[in-house]
Amino acid sequence: MNEIPVYAASYVLDSYGYGAVMGVPAHDEWDKEFADMNNLPSIKVIEEDIVINSLDYSNMKIKDFVSKLYEKGYSKWKIEYWM
């Protein structure tokens, strides 16, 4: 398993909202620009409707992958309001 660097940056629009930035440079234009400026790798993890480059989850359909994350408790819906 590879280590993932964590960066804190204020490159999101002020009016966009609050929260964490996903950081998927292979799939998001702003994340790609940030990665390129900082010489970070850009690894594609979805091709069409299939998960790729994701260890045991590679070759799964996205909907099956998301279901597996919920089953294992890695993902859940949560809404928080900050004032």
Image (cartoon, rainbow, N blue to C red):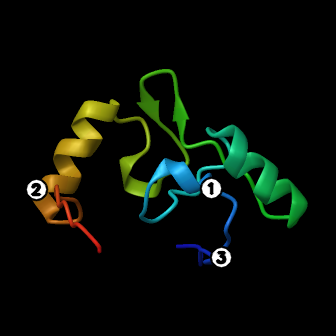
Q: Nearer the viewer, mark 1 or mark 3?
A: 1
41 up-or-down from 5: above or below: above
* Residue 18 horizontal/vertical position (percent): 43, 62
- Closer to the N terminus: mark 2 or mark 3? 3
- The front one of 60 and 5 is 5
* Residue 68 horizontal/vertical position (percent): 19, 49
Q: Amino acid at mark 2?
A: Glu
Q: Amino acid at mark 1?
A: Val
Q: Amino acid at mark 3?
A: Tyr
Taking the spot 28% from the left edge, 42% from the top edge, the residue there is 65
- The front one of 20 and 82 is 82
Q: Nearer the viewer, mark 2 or mark 1?
A: 1
Q: Residue furthest top?
A: 48
Taking the spot 62% from the left edge, 38% from the top edge, the residue there is 27
Residue 12 circle label = 1
Residue 45 picture quarter: top right
Look at mark 2 in the image and give the residue it sits on.
71
7 up-or-down from 18: above or below: below
Taking the spot 71% from the left edge, 38% from the top edge, the residue there is 29
Q: CA distance from mark 1 to mark 3?
A: 13 Å
- Closer to the N terminus: mark 2 or mark 1? 1
